[in-house]
Image (cartoon, grey):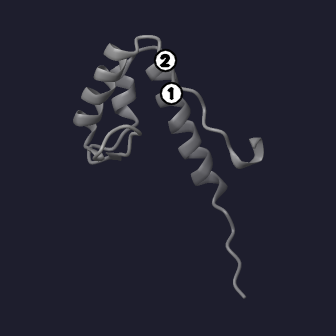
Amino acid sequence: MPTTTPDTSRTARLLELMKKGDDAFNARDFAAVDSVHHPDMVAHIPGNAEPIYGREAHSKAMAQLIGMFPDKRAAPPALSSDV
């Protein structure tokens, strides 16, 4: 039976991008937030009936979120080893 070896370099890169985005969000540096997102990204945001399509629409959604909740901060996701 074949086994799958996790690509730790890819995982590390994705975690690095997530941290960069979270740090930028917390600093309210939205140009830096945009820099970590693909132009054709799709975001599934709790509370939204439909996904958010594209980096530009995601930026607008984040601006609305900050407008409603100015103290909102991004927190690192819990990893399976943290749970």
Q: Is the residue under label 1 in contact with that under label 2 (CB below 8 Å)? A: yes
Residue 77: give x, y in percent of width and height. Answer: 61, 37
Looking at the picture, which amino acid does disc 1 mark?
Asp
* Element type where label 2 sits in the image: helix
Choose top left, top right, bottom left or bottom right for residue 44: top left
The residue indicated by pointer 1 is 22
Q: Residue furthest bottom?
A: 1
Quadrant holding the C terminus: top right
How much space separates mark 2 and mark 1, taking CA atoms?
A: 6 Å
Q: Residues within 10 Å of mark 1 (few under 14, many from 20)?
A: many
Nearest the viewer among 78 and 35 is 78
- Quick check: 52 above or below 11? above
Task: Specify the label residue 26 is tagged with.
Answer: 2
User: In which image quadrant can residue 59 be found?
Assistant: top left
Amino acid type of the residue tagged 2 in the rendering: Asn
Could you say whether the residue bearing mark 1 is in a helix, strand or loop?
helix
- The image's mark for residue 5 is none
How packed mark 2 is, by other alpha carbons closer than 10 Å (few <14, some 14-19, many 20 or more), is some
